[in-house]
Image (cartoon, grey):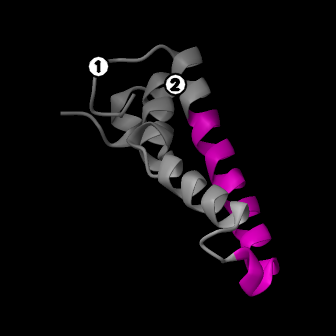
């Protein structure tokens, strides 16, 4: 749930934040594998290239973006003013 959307309970906001962090860690790992695979790993026929592309595509989804989820979690803990979402 993004910070400027409906109010979210703390466990849900924490879970969404944790998923966003896990996604960032996954992308770091996939990027490292992709870089160390050399040119053979970057072949369009290769499974690693497809997995790299799929992981990056999934990580681009708004639900897995860290800034929005961190702001929502912050708002659930400290209130909207703490995350800059007060209106």
Between residue 37 and residue 83, name the one nearer to us.
Answer: 37
Circles 1, 2 touching at the beta carbon (< 8 Å): no
Q: Is the residue marked by circle 1 packed among few (<14), some (14-19), or many (20+) residues within 10 Å?
A: few
Q: In which quarter of the image is residue 36?
A: bottom right
Q: Earlier in the sequence, mark 1 or mark 2?
A: 1
Q: Is mark 2 on a helix, strand or loop?
A: helix
Q: Is residue 79 left or right of residue 28?
A: left
Q: Mark 2 points at which residue?
A: 13
* Residue closer to the observer: 58 or 14: 58
Is 58 drawn above or below residue 7 in the view shown?
below
Residue 12 location in percent, x, y? 53, 18
Q: What residue appears at the point 32 percent right and 43 percent down from the top-left corner? A: 84
Is residue 70 highlighted in magenta? no
Q: In this view, does 28 lie above or below 7?
A: below
Q: Mark 1 points at which residue?
A: 6
- Count of marks overlaid on the render: 2
Instruction: Give the main secondary structure of the magenta stretch.
Output: helix
Q: Is residue 55 above or below residue 15?
A: below
**What separation in Å lies between label 1 and label 2 (alpha carbons)?**
11 Å
Boundaries of the magenta span: 17-41
Graded by Cα atoms within 10 Å as few (under 14), some (14 to 19) or many (20 or more), the crowding at tag 2 reads many
Quarter of the image with the C terminus in it: top left
Q: Where is residue 75 in the image (x, y as percent from the top left)?
A: 43, 29
Q: Residue at x 39, y 42 (%)?
A: 62
């Amino acid at each position: 749930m993004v910070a400027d959307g409906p109010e979210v309970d703390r466990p849900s906001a924490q879970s969404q934040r944790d998923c966003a962090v896990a996604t960032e860690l996954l992308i770091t790992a996939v990027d490292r594998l992709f870089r160390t695979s050399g040119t053979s790993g970057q072949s369009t026929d290769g499974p690693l290239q497809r997995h790299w592309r799929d992981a990056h595509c999934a990580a681009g989804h708004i639900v897995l973006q860290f800034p929005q989820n961190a702001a929502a979690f912050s708002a659930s803990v400290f209130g909207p003013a703490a995350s800059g979402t007060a209106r």
